Image (cartoon, grey):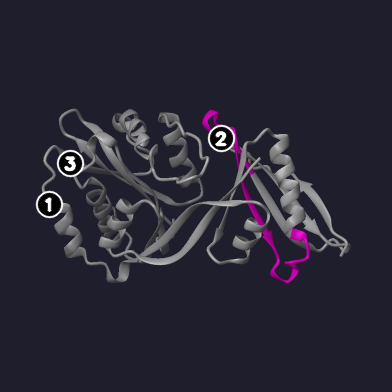
Amino acid sequence: MSLRITPLTDPEHGPRSRSLVWLASDAASIPLGTAFLRLFTDPGQQHLAELTVHVHPTERRKGVGSRLLDAAVAAARDNTRRCVVAQSEAGSPGDGFLTARGFRKVLTLRYVRLSLAGVDTDALTEIIEQPHPGYRLAHWQGTVPDDLAHTFAASRRAMDDMPMDDTDYGTVTWDVDRVRAAAKAVEQRGDLLHTVVAIDTSDGSIAGFTELVIPGSGTGDGQHYGTGVLPEHRGHDLGRWMKAESIRRASRDHPDLAGLLTDTADSNTHMRHINDGLGYTPTHTTHQHQLDL
């Protein structure tokens, strides 16, 4: 089969990454597959590239994916990347393809869903109303209020030690500009960002947070973006407390919402236990693969 790999221009360069794109086509210029390589540009992740390859099912096992991968890996090397990561569903053709091409499995992610149709609001209320001495809950929609902006940005380090197993993920640094930019990106695509935080009443600082993105239509499934508690505040059940409040508000404020989605590292037993206890059920598992260059 005559195969042509064409580099394309991706205009969606973001403030913290840029993308390279390739199109695979046959002699008749019919598209067969694509590859996207995201090059992270933040100082803590300039060693990292993230790869996504798609090949039309009828064109698989004909060398299309391999040619696209070769182009992307060569570009990663040209851009002085140390490693390339890619994700595939467990047991899928992509799983076997990445392994055969020298990638190693570095992380397992478990995806779960909570159906809001059967959510037990009484059980959520019981969790939320349990005393948490020294802490109180607060919430907002969209961009963080100015009076909490700095402490919210500081609380993001709660994610610094989230289990990433063998992934060479690097470090992500958050400041006020970054948290505001993230909220603005959600707003610009028409979705709603809802945040619940636990506040240390001794000094008014944020001890932990959980974020949930709701489709702008208020229908379909919402997506949890992250839940974290600062190390010095762990052991007080704040994660479950905040997440229960987030679920209750989503169910009450968006009655047409069908469910909530989240993913957790298989090794993150603490968060998996919280999700299981709140009624989330498994949907599928993916593997993160890494190629060291």
> Looking at the picture, which amino acid does disc 1 mark?
Gln
Q: What distance separates the C-alpha of mark 1 from that of mark 2?
A: 40 Å
- Residue 110 locus on image (x, y percent): 43, 59
**What segment is highlighted magenta in the picture?**
38-64
Percent from the top left, x then y, of residue 109? 45, 56
Residue 138: x percent and y percent?
23, 42
Image-based side of 274 in relation to 52, left or right:
left
Q: Which residue lies under the disc numbered 3?
A: 136
Residue type of the residue flagged with mark 2: Arg
Q: Can you tell which quarter of the image residue 144 is in? A: top left
Query: Label 1: how many residues lie within 10 Å, few (<14), some (14-19) or many (20+)?
Result: few
Q: Is residue 104 magenta?
A: no
Q: From mark 2 to mark 3, how far is it between C-alphas?
A: 34 Å
Element carrying mark 3: strand
Question: Is the residue under label 3 in contact with that under label 2 (CB below 8 Å)?
Answer: no
Residue indicated by mark 2: 16
Q: SS for tag 2?
A: loop
**Label located before the other in sequence (2 or 3):** 2
Image height check: is 59 above or below 22? below
Dot 1 or dot 3, earlier in sequence: 1
At x 55%, y 34%, the residue is 45
Q: Please tell me the numbered disc located at residue 229.
A: none
Say if mark 1 contacts mark 3, CB within 8 Å: no
Quadrant in which residue 176 is drawn? top left
Instruction: Determine the residue positioned at 23% across, 37% down.
Output: 233
Is 35 positioned to the left or the right of 181 in the image?
Answer: right
Q: Residue under label 1, please give it.
A: 130
Q: Nearer the viewer, mark 1 or mark 3?
A: 1
- Name the quadrant of the C terminus: top right
- Give the residue type that dot 3 points to: Arg
**For residue 53, what is the image quadrant?**
bottom right
